[in-house]
Image: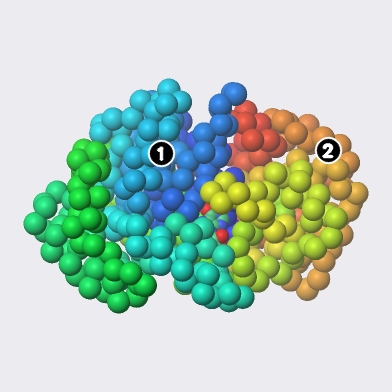
Amino acid sequence: MANLVVVGTQWGDEGKGKFVDILSEQAHTIVRFQGGHNAGHTIKVSNTTYKLSLLPSGIIRSDKTAVIGNGVVLDPWELLKEVRLIESMGVKISPERLIIADNIPLILPYHRELDLDREKEAGNNKIGTTGRGIGPAYEDKVGRRAIRTGDLRNEEHLRARLKIALKHHNKLRAYPVQEDWLFEHIMDIAKDVIQYIGPVWQYLHDAMTGNQDILFEGAQGSMLDVDWGTYPYVTSSNTLAGMASIGTGVPHNKIPNVLGITKAYTTRVGEGPMETELFDEVGEHLATVGKEKGTVTGRGRRCGWFDAPLVKKTCMLNGVTGIALTKIDVLDELGTIKIYNGEGYEEHEGWLSSTFGITQYDDLPELAKKYISRIEELVGVEIVLISTGPDREETITLKDPFK
Ligand code: IMP
């Protein structure tokens, strides 16, 4: 068995979607284990671009099973919207191929409203959330008042749970949520969601017994982890590899491989500290060439130089066993490229030639190889994959991350 978890080692948007898509060819099942539809995973296959927020990236391969684990928070309306959208692009989704845990906390309309209200009220102290209700939904989970996927199966039980949740939420709101309205609103879609619900943990254990490899798909990035990130400018879930276990029911010692997706420079969406941020034309160049716009919110990403101690630390926290270095081609036109090494910036001569689409390591310019080796040296983890463009094929494979 060679289960693998894919995580972002920076602030998200490292290009996880592309690698999860590539690696899902080798896996039987692809599992989301944290976050919600705040994630934005872009996958380009030939001329089609799929933008997924909630569904595991493996869903676009018709012979794979996609699983959403209990560590996720799930907006059922958004789920169905995404299912319909992907189906309209020619991908068939059935309950045999999409399995959703029965203990996932739901994101309900009042979570989104609370998220947006709080951000508005916070003024300069805002977090810069995606406004999807993620934080308030996780609060309800630990507050033990969440409505969970399994609750949709029993109307009476759902009513009782809604009463408890609304008692809390209506105190926080300018106008109350009507219980009857919300109940009907949920029941409108309950059946469509219920068809996908099942005992995910059992399914995954059976898959492992059958010697099938599982790919765990992280969302956001390590520096957005609620414990280990740049708190309070973080998301509300644990984004580190360890969460793959808690968020699915697969024991941690069954997930030996951790692929850390790492961008060749740094980006961040939303507020909060970013040591190597650039406010000059180089930052703008990275943003333009790298098309650094949030998949979910369309907001511009802040750009900066590679922060080596940051990635070294997140690799240690995640237990990264191999790095996939992405977007190296975005640096192609820069005469000087800097790396923050913890003490200061070291300057590297740019290669000033195109690396776009290169598939063999030996075809890379010598100066690009030098830059890549220096990152490897500073971070202390082997680089096993290099991405030279958004397509599946635009990839240099040095080692199989499943092994
Ligand atoms: P929330 O997850 O919507 O609560 O947002 C909290 C912080 O996480 C904000 O800074 C968001 O920009 C950031 N964030 C959430 N999801 C993603 C993602 O998928 N990529 C990058 N940043 C994200």
Seen from the viewer's position, the closer of residues 227 and 74 is 74
Q: Is residue 66 left or right of residue 258?
A: left
The image shows residue 153 at horizontal and vertical percentages of: 14, 49
Residue extending farthest to the front is 175
Q: Is residue 122 left or right of residue 184?
A: right
Q: Is residue 45 left or right of residue 187?
A: right
First in residue order: circle 1 vs circle 2: 1
In front: label 1 or label 2:
1
Q: Is residue 377 visible?
A: no
**Residue 135 lies in quadrant:** bottom left
- Mark 2 — residue? 365
What residue sits 25% from the left and 31% below the top?
A: 96
The image shows residue 97 at horizontal and vertical percentages of: 30, 32
Quadrant of the image for the N terminus? top left
Q: Secondary structure at mark 1?
A: helix
What residue sits 82% from the left and 66% below the top?
A: 345
Seen from the viewer's position, the closer of residues 380 and 341 is 341
What residue sits 35% from the left and 72% below the top?
A: 173
**Residue 358 lies in quadrant:** top right
Q: Amino acid at mark 2?
A: Pro
Ligand 1 closer than 8 Å to label 1 CB: no
What residue sits 31% from the left and 37% below the top?
A: 98
Seen from the viewer's position, the closer of residues 269 and 46 is 269
Figure disc tally: 2
Q: Which mark is residue 110?
A: none
Q: Is residue 104 visible?
A: yes
Work out whether 182 lies above or below 363: below
- Mark 1 — residue? 82
Seen from the viewer's position, the closer of residues 311 and 366 is 311
Residue extending farthest to the left is 156
Q: Amino acid at mark 1?
A: Glu
Q: Secondary structure at mark 2?
A: loop
